[in-house]
Amino acid sequence: MKSNVSQYDFERAFVDMGRQDSFTYEGKKALYDYLVEMEDGMGSEIELDVIALCCEYSEHATALEAAKEYGFEVDGPWFGAHRLVAMISEIKGIEDSDDEDLRAVVDDIIETYQDAPDEEEYLEEQEEAATNWLNDRTSVIVFDGGIIIQGF
């Protein structure tokens, strides 16, 4: 016999099994909503097994963090170079330097990366690429504050 499980019952089951720290509150809510939708789509009930859920799903702060953990490679060296350009740009008097080699290196770096997206835009692009990469390999549940991946 199966019974209906409310979100509170779902969260309480994690506490009762000593797994309250396996997912954040928001993560448990997202996982609960996902499982309820899955039940509705399948037309059958899912048995609540906290240990199985903890083995099958894992929560991460970002898709990029999760994808990197499983082998996703960040797109190119842009991020480090962008930080280098920002640091170099802050050096006082670089334009007035008598060291032509130094000026040439700085100019080359700035020219190469001046049209690159800003850091926030770059991270958004990488997050989207990581989410797509994970989606190609498993199911992901994206929620405000993190991501849960299934399977890996």
Image: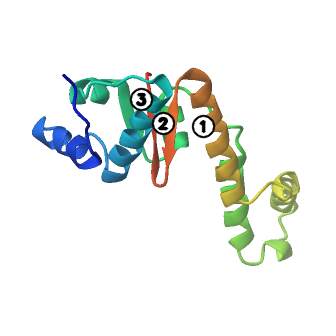
The amino acid on which the numbered mark 1 sits, given as a three-letter code, is Thr
| Relative depth, front residue between 102 and 131 | 131
Q: Is residue 1 left or right of residue 56?
A: left
Residue located 36% across and 40% down the image: 32
Sequence-first tag of 1 and 3 = 3
> In the rendered image of this protein, does residue 86 appear above or below residue 132?
below
Does the residue at mark 1 contact the one at mark 3 (Cβ under 8 Å)? no
| Relative depth, front residue between 52 and 60 | 52
Q: Residues within 10 Å of mark 2 (few under 14, many from 20)?
A: many
Asked if one can make out residue 72 in the rendered structure from this viewpoint, the answer is no
Local SS, label 2? helix
| Residue 45: quarter of image | top left
**Which residue has dot 3 on it?**
39
The amino acid on which the numbered mark 2 sits, given as a three-letter code, is Ala
> In the rendered image of this protein, does residue 58 appear above or below residue 43?
below
> In the rendered image of this protein, does residue 57 appear above or below residue 76?
above
Q: Looking at the image, is mark 1 or mark 3 nearer the viewer?
A: 3
Give the image location of residue 22, x and y in percent. Answer: 26, 39
Q: CA distance from mark 3 to mark 2?
A: 26 Å
Q: Quadrant of the N terminus?
A: top left
Q: Is residue 9 left or right of residue 34?
A: left
Local SS, label 3? helix
Residue located 70% across and 72% down the image: 91
| Residue 107: quarter of image | bottom right
Q: Is residue 137 left or right of residue 19?
A: right
Sequence-first tag of 2 and 1 = 2
User: Looking at the rendered structure, which numbered label has been put on residue 131?
Assistant: 1
Local SS, label 1? helix
User: Looking at the rendered structure, which numbered label has been put on residue 66?
Assistant: 2
Q: Quadrant of the C terminus?
A: top left
